[in-house]
Amino acid sequence: MIPQSFQYESPGSLAEAISMLQQYGEDAKILSGGHSLIPMMKLRFATPEYLIDINNIPGLSYIREENGTLKIGGLTREAELEHSDLLKQHFPIFADVTKLIADPQVRNMGTIGGNLAHGDAANDHPAVMMALHATVVATGPEGEREIPIDEFFYGFYMTALQHGDILTEIRIPMPPPGTGSAYHKMERKVGDYATAGVAVQITIGDNGVVTAAGIGLTNVNPVPLRAARSEQALIGKPLTEATINEAALYASEDCNPSSDLRGSEEYKRSIVATLVKRMIHQAVNRANNS
Amino acid sequence: MGHSLKRKEDARFIQGKGRYVDDVKLPGMLYMDIVRSPYAYAKIKNINIDEAMKVPGVVAVVTGRDLEKYNLHWMPTLMSDTQMVLPTDTVMYQAQEVAAVIATSKYAARDGREAVRVEYEPMKPVIDPYKSLDPDAPVLRTDKEGKKDNHIWNWKVGDKQKTDDVFAKAEVVVKEQMHIPRIHVASIETCGCVADYDKVNNHLTMYMTTQAPHAIRTVIALVAGHVGLTEEKIRVISPDIGGGFGGKVPVYPGYVIAIAVSFLVGKPVKWIEDRSENLQADSFARDYHITAEMAGTKDGKILATRFKVLADHGYTDASANPSKFPTGMFSIATGSYDYDATYMECDAVYTNKPPGGVAYRCSFRVTEAVHAIERITDRFALEIGKDPAELRLQNFIKKEDFPWKSPTGWIYDSGDYHKGLLKAMDTVDYHQLRAEQAEKRKRGELMGIGLSTFTEVVGAGPSKDFDILGIKMFDSAEIRVHPTGKAIARFGTKSQGQGHETTYAQIIAEELGIPAENIQIEEGDTDTAPYGLGTYASRSTPTAGAAAAVASRKLRDKARKIAAYLLEVSEDDLEWEPGKFFVKGAPEKSKTIQEIVFASYTNHPPGMEAGFEATHYYDPPNLTFPSGAYICVVDIDKETGAIHVRRFVAIDDCGNIINPMIVQGQVHGGLTQGIAPAMYEELIYDEAGNILNGTFMDYLVPTAVESPKWETGHTVTPSPHHPIGAKGVGESPTVGAPPAIANAIVDALSPYGITHLDIPITPFKVWKALKEKGAI
């Protein structure tokens, strides 16, 4: 388990990092938390010649609210998300998801930016970001640009990030009153990728009608998947067992899981349906108690 | 004895001061990495080392052709089969060693490995052991002259005619086909060595991860004697070991290659496996396909059992059993029950998978045996509608019937099975649980209660039956007490985490009255320790522990003589209490053991040999038979198949307990390694022989998160023949836990007509079974 030799760089500013990315081109990789990249390098599935460590760049790690928007720095560690009071208050889904990501040691290093930029449909944050209707900020040679989460994931390990881009921030609309969120995944053991995972955020209006819904699915599609039909089945209607079942059914139909050691395609669709129901209930309970 | 003395060895372990093989660094040391086969079965057309030799730091690439020149390309296994060190023509399993790269750093060695180009001609492998016996299956071991099939051996025991007759007439017969999955010990430390051959003195020092250093020295001498490495020229050092579990008993090709290279280049060579190599290439455990049958009466009396086994050994039989026992102690499969008819048969076959199988925390196939009997016993209870606890209580061998001769010939030394099970039932409030289960079943909820009441057979073993390659399975202790009354004791065993440095010291302290903290324990260096067969199969306390007690008693006899001399009384006038001899009726006239020892160096009786040392090689008169009663309670999520182990109670009987804390630690670890194959672990191969879960990402070793709260307890039935009445405990939990868990899960699912599931029982497997039965 020894990587191929590589050159290590540790830029002190974002501008320096971006210029290195431009200089080294396709042979360079960004090192953030390293918990996806380094295992791939040790197995020699990834063989970058230059490793650009962004951990020493100041100002990339924060969780704050600004003008109705939650902003999370790309270098924010999973452990910081797990223990943030701001998130606990408005986005209980973060405590759900971070606790299911690997183990405490990994969460002390792993970053939310890295989790998204890796572009792996088996990672947990993509589905959560879909449920929360997040926007990703990429900073490149031309400056900052915003990428809606639905336009971020392209294919297997492929994202809208261009070479020279660094994922610097995630922006999430602060939820209106009556909102709750929840995430759960079936995993074979702690730290495993999801057999299937479901993220839900739901807003119930004063009249009991669902005014907003976001549902994202983990590891049941080649790219992270929004369960759009399921969301539509809920929005504008009172929440009933019938609408919840409809949402669950659509999600199980619209995903594309493949059979593997975690279970058959049929099993995974069934888990998606079950988790959609359970996460809607969980999110609504939280909305009612908030 | 009986005190939870803190482990003496932990001071260095918890401070990072343990010394493992990979900590050994010698001047001029080279590093070895191994090229491995991507194919399960292929001819080697060509090995091109040109690019590898250009990698800076690479000094040599060794192939089977190189070893062939010294007749070192094959080696014997412990079961008298043969195994390739490096292949000359054919690879027989994926991840098999193909060539070794030697370099000045481990990084250069790995880069060199990546640069070796091997040209293969893949062949269609034999993966399914049942298909291995098909008449048209390719014969895998063409190296064996005249070999016409893939059959290795057939073994049988019991009375076939009598058993068949009982089955033919029985009111109830049940039968299940079960697979005990191929698993891996996955110890924290992988295997490795530093081979240090000194050309000038023609001497080899071998630092290696081995559970049996003395036996390994002998094996190396047998394999390499013809090139001048005779046994007195070999020193094997087994330093601190990070878990063995049977996986560090075999001699792996990497060790032999490292020795050969060090011999040829005259420099130390280090080889340390990485995790994937360890998991994919080192000996597996289990992999028994068992057809289990039980015959009995409608009211629950067990009358007979029949077991037919197909053993998948991979491409060579590299088991680590006593030589006369090709299936190890599988014949303990009659269990804890009183009946007299059984017949067991096993066929072993070759397939294109890694060789094995080792006794993973198991006294040689006892885990397989216990799973078979405990599962089929539950199946019988289910068939006749009887509570499985009641059925067990009805059939247990009674306390007063020990020593008890089993239908396969074992003499169970002692036991009180009723007491153990009743204690376990009391601990979980068994009848209350059954009432709760009945309520839940009415609501369609899945709750299960599983039992396992097993008998182990450990402490191999008596010399008339037990040997490995002819060497009898005794074990040894040598005690030297220094003039100031402090001692060093050395053993032929080797701790891999069991806590020998504490347990052995406690035994000697008990027998001699010298405080345990004043007794230094050493193992693992063949130049200093007495010969022994090593640590596995829960044998250390039954053999070397007994040797420590007997050697101590020899010293006590000498101490009595010296005390009599010093106190000027006759030996018969002296009485012993731990730590001193005193004159009967005059306790103020006494000599402490420290005074006596000092006198043995300074003022010993005329005619007596000076000094205070004793050695004993203990040949056990019988094996010991620990037992246990385990109860597992599970709740199952019907929609997802998720299994929650709500409670797990383990009542063990390992005879007299030396250190309760160490025993509890052993039980906790063993139970976790029991839940592992029951719910998580299995090495899975596809039809082409590719391993599908060759890393820890997919080979699911359970962690603290998966482990339930273990509730442990004891009954104490001393072994009548062991000097201190101890039986050994290291493996009981690993052996006893899987059927308790499997029985609990099947119990939960039984209302839907499910009578058996093979371990590991995963949520997906549960969901699939429920789906097939129309339950969801």
Image (cartoon, rainbow, N blue to C red):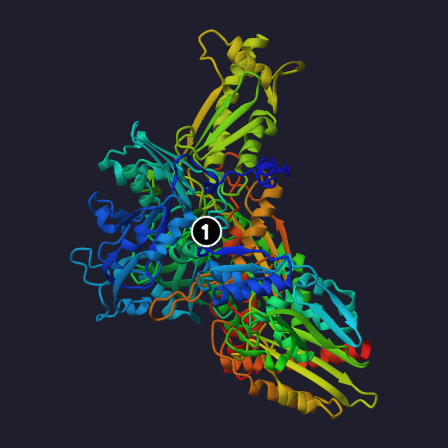
- Where residue B421 sits, quadrant-wise, is bottom right
Q: Tell me if mark 1 has few (under 14), some (14-19) or many (20+) residues whose alpha carbon lies within 10 angstroms of its own.
A: many
Q: Secondary structure at mark 1?
A: loop
Residue A112 lies left or right of residue B244; in this view the side is: right
Q: Is A1 situated above or below B766?
A: above
Quick one: quadrant of the C terminus of chain A? Answer: bottom right
Quick one: quadrant of the N terminus of chain A? Answer: bottom left
Q: Is B501 situated above or below B243?
A: above
**Residue B612 visible in the picture:** yes
Residue B141 lies left or right of residue B709; in this view the side is: left
- Where residue B121 sits, quadrant-wise, is bottom left
- Determine which residue is flagged by label 1: B362
Residue B142 lies left or right of residue B740; in this view the side is: left
| Chain under disc 1 | B
Percent of width and height locating residue B207 = 41, 38
Percent of width and height locating residue A207 = 83, 90
Q: How many marks?
A: 1
Percent of width and height locating residue B702 = 55, 59
Q: Is A103 situated above or below B267?
A: below
Question: In front: A205, or B456?
Answer: A205
Percent of width and height locating residue B35 = 34, 55
Residue B206 lies left or right of residue A22; in this view the side is: left
The residue under the point 70% across, 65% down is A81
Q: Residue furthest right?
A: A206
Residue type for callout 1: Cys
Q: Residue furthest left?
A: B146
Q: Residue furthest bottom?
A: A237
Question: In front: A115, or A158?
Answer: A158
